[in-house]
Amino acid sequence: MDYLKKGGRCSAIVALGANLMKLRPEIVVQNGKMSVGKKYRGSMERSVSDYIRGRLEGRTDLDLSRIFITHSGVPDEILTMAVDLVKSLQPFEEVLTSRAGCTITSHCGPGTLGVLFFKK
């Protein structure tokens, strides 16, 4: 939230309230535009788990050739948990991890994690 505030994408009062409530927003890219999706609440581990489940669980429209887990410096334990969860939810042929580039990192800040995949 601090980086959304710094980038002018939310007000200081919204960022303060979200930080107090431990809200972690989901940023969705659709049709070339970024928007806020769901908002997750709680620890980083719980939020990442809920986010991945929400993106992958029960889906039949995914191209299962590969998925990327991209992050901007999350602890190894969270990254390992994310990889294991992805593997348990969908039978992807490849699960690749990568570091986010400077644009994503400057917009979202450290501790950002996302899953990137193609639909059929």
Image (cartoon, helix red, strand yellow):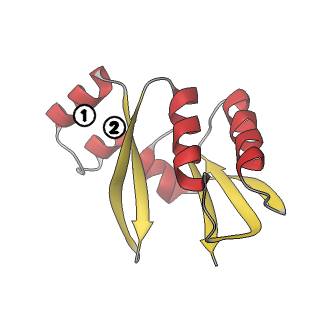
Residue 15: which disc? Answer: 1
> Above or below — where is 25 with respect to 90?
above
Residue 90: percent from left, percent from top: 73, 55
Q: Secondary structure at mark 2?
A: loop
Q: Residue at x 42, y 59 (%)?
A: 28
Q: Residue at x 34, y 37 (%)?
A: 1
Closer to us: 102 or 50: 50
Q: Quadrant of residue 85?
A: top right
Q: Give the residue type that dot 1 points to.
A: Ala
User: Which image quadrant: the C terminus?
Assistant: bottom right
Q: Which residue is mark 2?
A: 1
Q: Is residue 22 left or right of residue 59?
A: left
Q: Give the residue type that dot 2 points to.
A: Met
Residue 40: percent from left, percent from top: 41, 36
Whether residue 33 is visible here, answered yes or no, is yes
Whether residue 111 is visible here, answered yes or no, is no
Q: Residue at x 48, y 58 (%)?
A: 103
Residue 26: percent from left, percent from top: 42, 48
> Above or below — where is 62 with respect to 87?
below
N-terminal-most mark, 2 or 1 = 2
Q: Is residue 91 left or right of residue 99?
A: right
Q: Residue at x 40, y 77 (%)?
A: 31
Could you tell me if the residues under marks 2 and 1 are in contact, i.e. CB atoms within 8 Å? Answer: yes
Q: Secondary structure at mark 1?
A: helix
- Crowd class of label 1 (few under 14; some 14 to 19; many from 20; radius 10 Å): some
